[in-house]
Image (cartoon, helix red, strand yellow):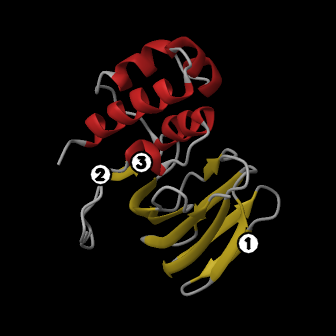
Amino acid sequence: MSSPLATIAEALRRERARTGISLTELARRAGIAKSTLSQLEAGSGNPGVETLWALAVALNVPFSRLIETPATPVRIIRAGEGVRYPAEEANFAGTLLASSPPGVSREIYQLHIEPGATRHAESHIPGSVEHVIVAKGRLRTGPTGSEVELAEGDYATFPGDIPHIYEALEPHTWAVLVMEHR
């Protein structure tokens, strides 16, 4: 199994080549420094969720396409295992549990969120929809300005292609997020 950085590097090179855009143009579209993108494509650096999401949007691909390792016939991710991708500005981390094969558009994440800074998520690719189920704790989430509070076992869905937030209201909050791309 390759390291998360090696997986990201390979995916960025593959997707940039697929779209036919230059390193400079992708960095511009994603709003990141060209040197940062160069480091990521070389398999170094320490990208946060925000940087990877910006790159996915600029490449017009689901986030999972940049971080998922090649599939195996049976895949198990035990509790507490899997690669966590932390946010840069909030105590928020997502672990990709599954993505969709070509032609199917679904990703499943496990989110771990602590009280403190709110995770402000930018718009994802057009047609994205988020489905959230709180497994433990309490969570405030939804489109910016239309947030809702969810308790353990509650479910909400909202457009992911507009700015939205995630804020833990209790310690050790975790939820399942299903991303749908149309």
Residue projecting furthest to the right = 145
Q: Quadrant of the C terminus?
A: bottom right
Q: Nearer the viewer, residue 26 or 72?
A: 72
Front of the two marks 1 and 2:
2
Label 1 close to label 2 by CB (< 8 Å):
no
Label 3 close to label 1 by CB (< 8 Å):
no
Residue projecting furthest to the front = 103
Amino acid type for the residue under numbered disc 1: Val
Binning the other alpha carbons within 10 Å of mark 3 as few (below 14), some (14 to 19) or many (20 upward) gives many
Q: Secondary structure at mark 2?
A: loop
Q: Nearer the viewer, residue 156 or 101?
A: 101
Binning the other alpha carbons within 10 Å of mark 1 as few (below 14), some (14 to 19) or many (20 upward) gives some
Q: Mark 1 and mark 2: span between their CA atoms? A: 36 Å
Amino acid type for the residue under numbered disc 2: Pro
Residue at x-position 29% and y-position 25%: 44
Residue projecting furthest to the bottom = 153
Residue 20 image point, x, y percent: 55, 21
Q: Quadrant of residue 66?
A: top left
Which residue does the numbered mark 1 point to in the structure image?
A: 148
Mark found first going from the N terminus, 3 or 2: 2
Amino acid type for the residue under numbered disc 3: Pro
Which residue does the numbered mark 3 point to in the structure image?
A: 86
Placement of 180 over or under 88, stated as above or below: below
Check residue 70 in the rendering and tell me which mark sits there, or answer none: 2
Q: Nearer the viewer, residue 168 or 73?
A: 73
Mark found first going from the N terminus, 1 or 2: 2
State left or right for residue 125 relative to residue 36: right
Q: Mark 3 and mark 2: span between their CA atoms? A: 21 Å
Residue at x-position 36% and y-position 24%: 41
Q: Mark 3 and mark 1: span between their CA atoms? A: 23 Å
Mark found first going from the N terminus, 3 or 1: 3
